[in-house]
Image (cartoon, rainbow, N blue to C red):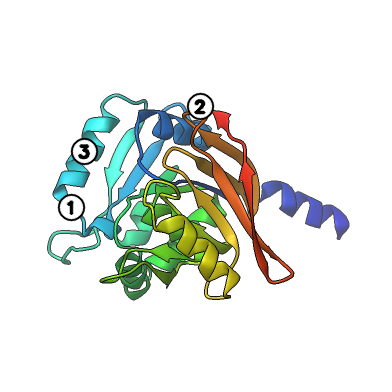
Amino acid sequence: MAANAELFAQKQEIRKIFLTGGGYDLKTINYLISLTGKENPKICFLPTPMGDSDAYINKWFEIAKELPLQPFVQKVFISSAEQKTPFEETLLQMDAILVTGGNTLNAVALWKAHGIDVILRKAWEKGVVLSGPSAGAICWFEEGLSDSRPVNYTAVKGLGFLKGSNCPHYHTEAERRPLYLKMIEEGKLLPGYACDETAGLYFEGTQLKRVVAQNKADKAYKITKSRGKVVETALEPELI
């Protein structure tokens, strides 16, 4: 019985999530490629947070021309007449899935309406690397600080693959950091992680394995609470 359990554990795929505070440029995507362990991985662009923007999709294919990958895109704003392949069939054959920035609230709602939330979890458990900046980072956590609603930044719910909360653009947008810390201290957001633009967090399962960035100025931060007070701890990154 013990031998069977050990064999099953060996067959389990490593669940991987790589997220950043900001963009998805060549260096970031090259790092994502390395996480797949493939020489020419299939990477699917999931632009739901940007409403399947053609401009973002075109940008993705332009970037992909310079990289050793097979680019795909999966739109959600589709019809049965124009798409004959189920979402699950497309997404589960990928080596990585890259979610854009944009409106986290809308993206999660649409994924749940289509059952894509369940498919993304299956992909994660299958070893497909899940990735993204901004909204594409928040979505993997239980919740995050988002600009998805009018007027003010607010808390939004994510898919909950990772525990706690997330805040992107930590020092780029002046209101983000003080509001994130305040909301955690007041119990309006769970403790979690914040990232500057090029800073990235790589998780295996739900454990943080690496912190990376493209320059020394950008960092990631772990935010906790101790005796009712918020504690911000800088996580020094490895440069990529």
Q: Residue at x 26, y 27 (%)?
A: 65
Q: Amino acid at mark 2?
A: Ile
Q: Quadrant of residue 71?
A: top left
Name the residue type under label 3. Lys
Q: CA distance from mark 1 to mark 2?
A: 29 Å
Q: In the shown orientation, is residue 95 left or right of residue 45? A: right
- Numbered mark located on residue 7 in the image: none
Residue 51, image x and y in percent? 21, 60
Q: Quadrant of residue 96?
A: top left
Residue at the outermost left position: 81
In the image, residue 92 lies at what x, y percent?
A: 42, 53
- Which residue bears the numbered disc 1? 53
Which numbered disc, 3 or 2, marks the residue that appears first in the sequence?
3
Q: Residues within 10 Å of mark 3 (few under 14, many from 20)?
A: few
Determine contact: label 1, label 2, CB under 8 Å: no
Q: Is there a contact, CB below 8 Å, between mark 3 and mark 2? A: no
Which dot, 1 or 2, sits closer to the camera?
A: 2
Q: For the view shown, which residue lies furthest in the right direction?
A: 2
Secondary structure of the residue carrying numbered label 2: loop
- Residue flagged by tag 1: what amino acid is it? Ser
Q: Verify CB contact (< 8 Å) between mark 3 and mark 1.
A: no
Q: Judge by depth and name the residue closer to the eye, 112 or 19.
A: 19
- Report which residue position mark 3 lands on: 59
**Residue assigned mark 2:** 240
Residue at the (38%, 38%) spot, across then down = 42
Considering only order in the chain, which callout, 2 or 1, is on the residue closer to the N terminus? 1
Q: Looking at the rendering, in which quadrant would you find the N terminus?
A: bottom right
Find numbered disc 1 in the image and state the secondary structure of the residue it sits on: loop
Q: Position of residue 197 (x, y in %)?
A: 41, 42
